[in-house]
Image (cartoon, rainbow, N blue to C red):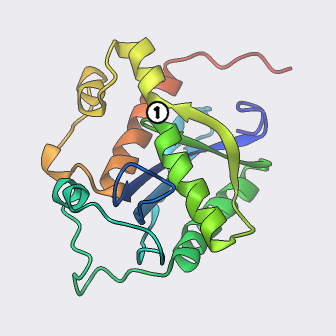
Amino acid sequence: MARRFRGFLPVVVDVETGGFDWNRHALLEMAAVPIEMDAEGRFYPGQTASAHFIPAPGTEIDPRSLEITGIRLDHPFRMAKPEREALSHVFNHVRAAVRRYGCQRAILVGHNAHFDLNFLNAAVARSGHKRNPFHPFSVFDTVSLAGIAYGQTVLARAMQAAGLDWDASEAHSAVYDAEQTARLFCRIANAWPHPPAA
């Protein structure tokens, strides 16, 4: 894995938020799926880590975003954590996968990946978290990959073009979207020949 991606471990991330402005709106959910590699060099989604976030002080929530995601901030089983604690929960899982593969750090994989990375980086800066395992600006974006592979950039359509199931009723959950995006990334990456060893 470290040789395949130049020392980076691909980790699929999806966030659900209180709006579109990462400088202003709250981070509400995050899920991360490390990409694993089998003995034949084929990729598959690893175990998911996820967390619900208590909106950080000073952040805002656009009610329209909650209508889209269906998030109920007052749900008794939401078990949300403060921002720094929630980040640590996910980061610990990612760092363990990075160490397992002998990689230097994680690289975020996402559908419109810079949206997820910008919210992640804003939360890291806001909480003063010092152990972010992700590269600060490089990503693998499945919008670009699916556009090249299948001529589709919308996640649901890309999944269908790849021959993968998609349940619209489950969409806009960080866990569901991250796990589906991980399946899509693996389907595309497994169809691409591995480069020769340097």
Tell me if residue 4 comes above or below residue 24 in the rendering: above
* Image coordinates for residue 120, horizontal then vertical, percent: 55, 56
* Image coordinates for residue 82, horizontal then vertical, percent: 49, 81
Label 1 belongs to which residue? 185
Element class at badge 1: helix
Q: Looking at the image, which residue is at 22% across and 36% down? A: 165
Nearest to the observer: residue 184 or residue 123: 123
Q: Looking at the image, which residue is at 56% across and 64% down? A: 123
Q: Give the farthest residue toward the bottom.
A: 76
Q: Looking at the image, which residue is at 41% across and 60% down? A: 25
User: Where the C terminus falls, by quadrant?
Assistant: top right
Relative to 42, 96 lies left or right: right
* Image coordinates for residue 188, horizontal then vertical, percent: 46, 24
Give amino acid for label 1: Phe
Quadrant of residue 80 in the image? bottom left
Quadrant of residue 75 in the image? bottom left
